[in-house]
Amino acid sequence: MTLLNPSPNPWILSRSLVIILAFVGCAKEEPLGPDLSGLYGELELLTAFSNNSPNGVHFEANEKVEFSADFNLEVDYTLSLTGQSSGAKYSISGKGANLSDVSWGGDCDDVFFGPMEWVHCVLEFDDHPQSTQLDSVFVWEQPDLSFKGVLLTSFEDPSAFSLTSGDFTEYLETVNNAPDAVEGSTYMTGFGSGPATWFGALRITMDPATLSNITVADSFLNLHLRSEFEGSATVIKVFEDSNDDGIINSGDDEVFTTKVPIAADGQWQRMNLPLSDLSLDLSGNNVAVNGGLLDLDNILRLDITISQVGTADGTFGFDADYIILTPDEPF
Ligand SMILES: [Ca+2]
Ligand SMILES: [Ca+2]
Ligand SMILES: [Ca+2]
């Protein structure tokens, strides 16, 4: 680009600079300057926005939704998917002259997409707000996303967990054949009353042999939770067999814990908890054995405790579903 000419008109020059600077200012993440053809051109769809699943997608059969469209320009686009019953959302952003790389296997940003639901697909373009395109796809089954990590329990299999009640527990059971389960058809519900901090617990036996991809520094414990009781919290407790005698003994073995408040909006929400948030619990007669470090190869048990943020006299609790450990990034 040549700005200078033999007899530059200062007004034109400064005006050109202002325009150029304005474009440079608008061009995010483009260190070499904007793609002027993309900015000036009219966007045209050479082939319509569509997908390969006109009869719906069967995630159970490992199908994916492949989206398609061809543009006359390289464009920045965002495809936003919204479940019409579940409210689940997922979005994919990219840049290109087509959607040949854009597919969806049932991933979700927060809660799961539901079975038998319509998903609205909105394709938007950063630089061409008038060109928004709409499509939809029907989802027959929920996807199995357990390949993303180590699934601890989805509550569908009663042998994968146990429930432990106490003096202040009012109710602690699984809800079966539940259309409002965030995943599958079963979830757990538990609540208790009184000025206590322990109203019962979900207990999951851990097998360290399954945790080879999991590290304390980079992994997450992901839970789906729902509460209507203001002030509710969960205390996560991880129990080691620090002295390798095969059993968990208070006073012999290390315990790691963290407490997390739960929003009481009655909506399923996903909590992604870094394992590094767990800290050595020295309450009661708990001890530090081997330096107070969480050793995943010594973990025997995980408790998801029903608790409250403070010590008020009230009712506290939550629903829980689909608890999964994921390496490297949140579920
Ligand atoms: Ca479930
Ligand atoms: Ca032990
Ligand atoms: Ca340890």
Image (cartoon, rainbow, N blue to C red):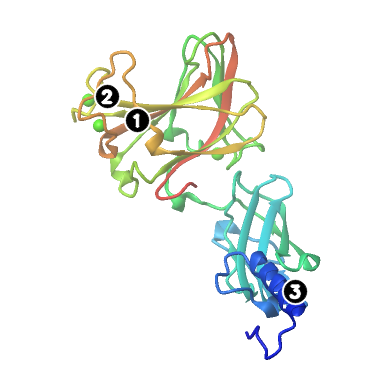
Task: Tell me which numbered mark, 3 or 1, is placed earlier along the sequence.
Answer: 3
Query: Which residue in the protein does label 1 denote?
Result: 301
Query: Which residue in the protein does label 3 denote?
Result: 15
Disc 2 residue type (three-letter): Ile
Q: Nearer the viewer, residue 204 or 233?
A: 233
Residue 72: x, y in percent?
A: 71, 81
Determine which quarter of the picture holds residue 206: top left
Q: Quadrant of ligand 2?
A: top left
Determine which quarter of the picture holds residue 210: top left
Identity of the residue drawn at 28% across and 44% down: 209
Please rate how many residues cluster around mark 1, counting C-alpha atoms within 10 Å: few if below 14, some from 14 to 19, many from 20: some
Disc 3 residue type (three-letter): Arg
Give SS at disc 3.
Answer: helix
Q: Nearer the viewer, residue 269 or 175?
A: 269
Identity of the residue drawn at 68% across and 70% down: 23
Query: Which residue in the protein does label 2 denote?
Result: 248
Q: Work out how far the residue at label 3 is from the one at label 1, CA to CA, in angstroms.
A: 69 Å
Q: Quadrant of the N terminus?
A: bottom right
Q: Work out how far the residue at label 1 is from the one at label 2, CA to CA, in angstroms.
A: 9 Å
Query: Does the image show residue 248?
Result: yes
Q: Work out how far the residue at label 2 is from the one at label 3, CA to CA, in angstroms.
A: 75 Å
